[in-house]
Image (cartoon, helix red, strand yellow):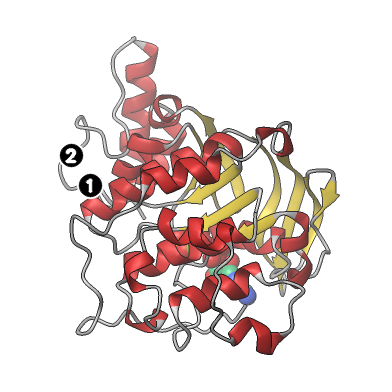
Amino acid sequence: MSTEQHDTPSVDAVPVDGTTGLDTEALEAVIAAPGERFRHDYLEMRDLRVVFDGFVAVDGIDLTVTQGDLRFLIGPNGAGKTTVVDAITGLAPATGSARFGGVELVGRPSHRTARAGVGRTFQTASVFDELTVLQNLDIAAGAGRRPWTMLRRRSVVPEHVEQALDTVGLGHVRDLPAGVLAHGQKQWLEIGMLLVQDARLLLLDEPVAGMSQSEREQTGRLLQRIGEQRTVIVVEHDMEFLRAFASSVTVLHQGSVLSEGSVAQVQADPKVVEVYLGRDAGARASASAATGGAPPSPGSSSTPSSPSPSSAEVS
Ligand SMILES: Nc1ncnc2c1ncn2[C@@H]1O[C@H](COP(=O)(O)OP(=O)(O)OP(=O)(O)O)[C@@H](O)[C@H]1O
Ligand SMILES: [Mg+2]
């Protein structure tokens, strides 16, 4: 897939109104697929390491995410979140191991990761702007078909492509070029492309950045449902979104795992508080935990109203 990236068009973007959201009925049809295929899937990273010209971006990470988990991966800018996803999808040179469904992903070229059931989205949506929504889905679904048959408009749209189109709420814009979609819709299109590829491991890099509140909520519910069957890792900065939808959280800092657990556990971890809010806040959290008091947490109501970075967009 092209990774050509464009700024979100602001003037001619297709508006999202209340009637054009995600289609939960279609989603039910997609996730009603036999669950057997997904059961026991898990991603296991062991001593995953990425070094760029002597700079250690990912410093020996151990991380396990099971099918049915909606794992959020958070951490300050430069923590190594995207590099972990790149390492798993063949876009960053890695050592160590990352196995999914019994397949080693480290060292696997990026064009072969989809075949291992792995799909990802990028921080900036990477759809083919000149092609229609349907053609984008068709290409994602069409591994093995010849390029000219993929680009030809077909009279019959395959059932699973039709379902994905409805699931991500883009049926009404199916014949428009993807370039005119609003930012949120492009992200949904990308998620739709992973569904038609039948990705069993989905790695989503900041999927709700730039989305409206209503788009975020719809996306969160979509990911929760997809995460019931598939293995999903969501890289995010938005703490409000995390609190609403994460089932577990891993915090990265300077290429290492700083903390891991439920949202509540991670928010109460003094190390996490310190990284996000500064050393003093971390020390107060430690003291508070020792005396049984409620510690401050990133983005919680007990934190200052405008910590730096902000409570809503910890970055
Ligand atoms: N191709 C590269 N060459 C050299 N250094 C890189 C490369 N890609 C990433 N880095 C560095 O690795 C570190 C981790 O970057 P990464 O993009 O993974 O962070 P991130 O956690 O995704 O941050 P953000 O929240 O800003 O997206 C950063 O210091 C970054 O500058
Ligand atoms: Mg990143």
Q: Residues within 10 Å of mark 2 (few under 14, many from 20)?
A: some
Above or below 163: residue 272 = above
Q: Is residue 164 left or right of residue 238?
A: right
Q: Nearer the viewer, residue 132 or 89?
A: 132
Q: Which residue is located at x 61 percent, y 47 percent? A: 256
Q: Would you say 116 lies left or right of 216 here?
A: right
Q: Residue furthest top?
A: 292
Badge 1 is on which residue? 307
**Residue appearing at x 40%, y 73% in the figure:** 174
Side of 6 where 241 appears, left or right: left
C-alpha gap between disc 1 and disc 2: 6 Å
Residue 226 lies, in percent from the top left, at: 51, 43
The disc placed on residue 210 is none
Q: Give amino acid for label 1.
A: Pro
Q: Nearer the viewer, residue 88 or 12?
A: 12
SS label for mark 1: loop
Q: Nearer the viewer, residue 311 or 155?
A: 155
Q: Is residue 126 visible?
A: no
Figure label count: 2
Q: Is residue 225 visible in this depiction of the protein?
A: yes
Query: Mark 2 and mark 1 in contact (Cβ < 8 Å)?
Result: yes
| 171 and 225: which is toward the camera | 171
Disc 1: CA contacts within 10 A as few (<14), some (14-19) or many (>=20): some
Give x and y (percent) for residue 252: 54, 47
- Residue 31 location, quadrant: top right
- Which residue is identified by label 2? 304
Look at 65% across and 54% down and name the residue there: 199
User: SS at mark 2?
Assistant: loop
**Position above or below: 143 against 119:** below
Q: Quadrant of the N terminus?
A: bottom right
